[in-house]
Structure formats: C-alpha cells, structure tokens
Amino acid sequence: MTESEIFAVMIDGQVVAQDQARISVFDRGFLYGDSIYEVMRTYDGKIFALREHIDRLFRSAEQVFIDIPVSKDRLSQEILHAASLLELPNLLIRVHITRGIGPYGLDPTGARQPTRVMIVVPLLVPSEDQYRDGIAAALFQSQRTTDNTSAAGAKVANYLVSLLALRQAHAVGAKEAIIVDGRGRVLEGASSNVFIVRSGVIRTPPVNEGILSGITRSYLLKAAAHEGLELRETSLTQTELLDADEVFVSSTTREVLPVTRIDDRTIGTGKVGPITRAIHRAFRAIGGLPAILPGNRPNSTQ
Ligand code: PMP
C-alpha cells in the first residue's frame, strides 16, 4: 500500500478514514493469524456471488470456532455499503474477521468479540496477453497450515505457505505457484484452484483434499455441465499435471486463466487450449457476464 492508493475501510461496521484504519496489536489476527476472510469482486458495480462468499465465510468461521457477531444479512448490507464507498466499476472487497482481543496467550477461549474489517480497493486483473497466451506457473512442494485438521479447506488468513510459494514463483518469472503435497498430489494454486484437460476431459482435485472450495470453481462445475463438457473431481498427480493437454487456474479475480508453462515444461501445444476457452466462455455466460473473454477483445492492443 502506498499513500496514493485509494481504498475504503470499515471496521466493525464503521467507515474509517484511510489513515485511521488501525486495529490493536493485541488482536489475535495480528498475533496468531487467528482469522478468516473472503475476497469478492464487483463487475460494473455489482458484487459477484455475494451470497456464496458470505456462506463460505460463515463455514470457515464455524471450522475455526469464531462466532461472527452479525447475521448474514447484516454482513451483506455492510459489504454493499463498503463497496459503495469507492465509485469505480471494478472493485476488490476483502472481508476479514479476526477472533479479536482476548486474555494474552494462545488459548482462544476468552476472546469473544471478533473484529470485522472490510477493505475495498480498485481491482487489478491479469493483462490481456496473459489470457491470450497463458501464464507460466511454478510448482511448490509443501503442506498448508490447516492440512489434516478440522479446519482443512477453511479460508484462514494465514497465507504464509502461499506467499512463500508465490515469492518463489515470481523469482523464476512465473505468475502463479501450484502447491503439490509430499505425496506428489497437486492441490491448488497459491490463490487459485487448478484444472487440467486430458483427452477432452477436465479434471480438478476434490475439496476433500483440503483445498479451498473456490466460488469460481463451483461456477465452473456448473458451466461444464451446462456446456456438456466432462469434468471430474479426482486427485491429480504432478505427472498428470505436466502431461496435460491444457491447464488453467480459477479464482474470483482471474476467472479462468490459462497456464501454458509449468517450471521448464511446456503444457500441451504451448498455446491456450479450446476447452479452456470454452469453459471460460460458459463461466461468463452462467455468471451473467459480458460474452467477450479477456484476451480476446476485438481491438485489444496488448
Ligand atoms: N484456492 C486458494 C488457496 C485461494 O486463495 C483462492 C482465492 N480465494 C482460490 C482457491 C479461488 O477461490 P475463489 O474462486 O473463491 O476466488
């Protein structure tokens, strides 16, 4: 963040000036990463999949035993209000709930007043050429914070593994990291879900492998069914990923982003594949978005 960046903040339901947007050093979100969050976006001023994001936030809260202090409806109203604070068509809205302040120490039981923070910033999306040509990704072998716990798959805000993975990916010129576990299973991206296409069949790891149940991913399951594309939720090995005909990642801010290179391997022909394009188009159609895909604009200069 720099001083010149425009953003809007609400803390516990109150709009707060940019330079007053602070929470206590005793907040457990700061001390322990004891918090959960959502990232949503607007298209032309309208929040995409608001209900699904709120439902997922409440599911994450249950998984880590945080009691969100407001109802889903009240939270929706606050999010809509936060989104109205910046008059730009395309915004990113982060909704963050920490366990708040409790008696000093690790034990969470005394912390009963969660803190809720909303941050709204102008949305940055991948460039047209990334959609047109695909991106490079880098593999990163690791466990994640909540793996094999009851909070597996919750959107907890401790993103250190993803952050280290992305840092390493950027160091080799890649735009996303793909997390592979100790057994060689492909899980998800640093902040995206992963899909492969082989012999016309789309595959993506199942959510019971502890991945985030992506909202975009759930739309893609529907989009595939709608298009008559076969999509299977099955474990994926690193070899299957590298031998795929097509690979793409999905997320709220990137929609469907083709991956044409992983580490030093070219994926398929090295060009964006037809099924990636088809499912992206279908996603836009069922999401009620304009039909033109990024990277495919008639007068694109990039
Ligand atoms: N996996 C991880 C680890 C993520 O951080 C994200 C981004 N929230 C996703 C998947 C994609 O989820 P969504 O489609 O809901 O943005």
Image (cartoon, rainbow, N blue to C red):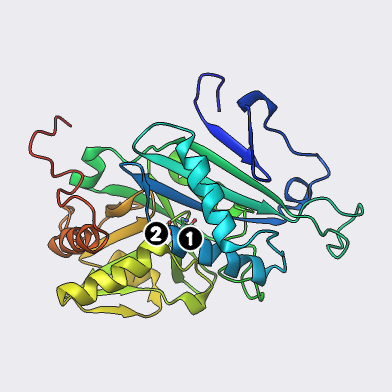
Q: Is residue 27 left or right of residue 77?
A: right
Find residue 49 and name its label: 2
In-front residue for pair 266/281: 281
**Is the distance from the Cβ of mark 1 to the nearest ligand 1 atom less than 8 Å?**
yes
How far apart in space, not on screen, are marks 1 and 2 (Cα)? 6 Å
Depth order, front residue of 208/98: 98
Q: Disc 2 beta carbon < 8 A from ligand 1?
A: yes
Residue picked out by circle 1:
53
Q: Are marks 1 and 2 in contact (CB under 8 Å)?
A: yes
Q: Quadrant of the N terminus?
A: top right
How busy is the neighbourhood of tag 2: few (under 14 within 10 Å), some, or many (20 plus)?
some
In the rendered image, the residue lying farthest to the top is 4
Residue 189: give x, y in percent of width and height.
Answer: 44, 58
Question: What numbered label is drawn on residue 190?
Answer: none
Please state which amino acid type lies under the numbered disc 1.
Answer: His
Q: Position of residue 150 (x, y in %)?
A: 66, 76
Label 1 CA crowd tier, 10 Å (few <14, some 14–19, many 20+): some
